[in-house]
Image (cartoon, rainbow, N blue to C red):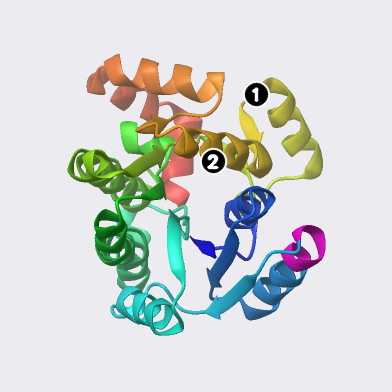
Amino acid sequence: MSYALITGASSGMGRCYAHELSKRGYGIIAVSNRPEELYAVGEELRAQYGVAVVTIVADLARKDAAKELYAMCRSEGYDVEILVCNAGMLLFSTLIKTEPTKLNTIIDLHCTTTTLLCRYFGEDMKQRGRGRILVMSSATAWLPYPTVSHYSATKAYLKSFTFSLWYELHRHGVSVTAVFPGAVDTPFYNLSDRARRILRHLGVMLTAEQVARRGVRAMMRGQRRLIPGIFTKLVVAICAILPARLLDIVLRIGPIRRLLERV
C-alpha cells in the first residue's frame, strides 16, 4: 500500500490534507505532538474511508525528529509516496519580544525538519522514480511582515528551498509543490465566529478544507506552486511592487505604530 505522510495532521490544515488524501485511497501516516487529537483523527479516517492509518506522536521541532521518523517508516516497510510538510507554529510578536527558545522551535520546525524530511524521503522517491512532495509555505514569504518576522522568514526559506528542490527532482518523476496560503480559518487566529464568517464571505480568509482541496489538486497535477484565493494572489502581486519606503510610512500611522509597540 502507498502511504501519504502528513505532519501536523491532528488539526487544521493537516487534518484536511489527511481527509483529502484518504478520499483518494492512500494510507495515512499522521504525525503530530498532540496525541488525543491525533488518535481522534485516525479513528475518523478509518471510519469514513476504510483506509489504513498510522498515528505517530512526535515533537517535530527536535533536531533528530526527521531522522527518527524516517527510520521508523523504513523499519515498518511503509511505502511513502506522498510527503506533506505541514506542521507549523505562528506566534505574533516582534523579534525583540520573542523568547529565544521559541525562535529556535520555529526555525527547527519549519526549516530543519522540513528540509531533512524532504532529504530522506526524497531520496527514496527519486530511486523509485515516483513520488510527490507538498510543502506548506505562506503568503508572508513574499513580503516583509512586521510582528511575525521570524515566521515569515522561515516561510521565505521554504519558498526558495521548495522551488530549488523542484528543479532537482521533477525530472526523476518526483513532483514538488509549494503552497502559499494567506489567512486560513484555523485555530492560529484568535477571532470571533462573526469575524471569521465576515472574512470568509469577503474572500480574505479561506477555510482549511478549501486550501487542502486546492493544494492536493495542484500537487497531483505536478504544479510547482499554488497561491490559493484571489485576494491572496492580489496581495502578493501588490506587495511585489510595493516600495519599502511606502510600507515604512504606513507603519508610522498612530494606531498601527501603537499596535507594533504592544506585541
Task: List x then y, in percent, for residue 209.
Answer: 67, 42
The residue shown at (42%, 77%) is 73
119 with respect to 210 (left or right): left
- Quarter assignment of residue 178: top left
Which disc is residue 76 wearing?
none
- Per the image, the residue denoted by label 1 is 203
Depth check, front residue: 68 or 199: 68
Callout 2 amino acid: Val
Whether residue 48 is in magenta: the answer is yes
The residue shown at (69%, 21%) is 202
Task: List x then y, in percent, for residue 125.
Answer: 31, 57
Whether residue 91 is in magenta: the answer is no
The residue shown at (54%, 76%) is 33
What distance separates the C-alpha of mark 2 from that of mark 1? 20 Å
230 with respect to 95 (left or right): right
Callout 1 amino acid: Gly
Task: List x then y, in percent, for residue 58.
Answer: 48, 79
Inspect this view and state whether residue 143 appears. Answer: no
- Per the image, the residue denoted by label 2 is 216
Above or below 62: residue 223? above
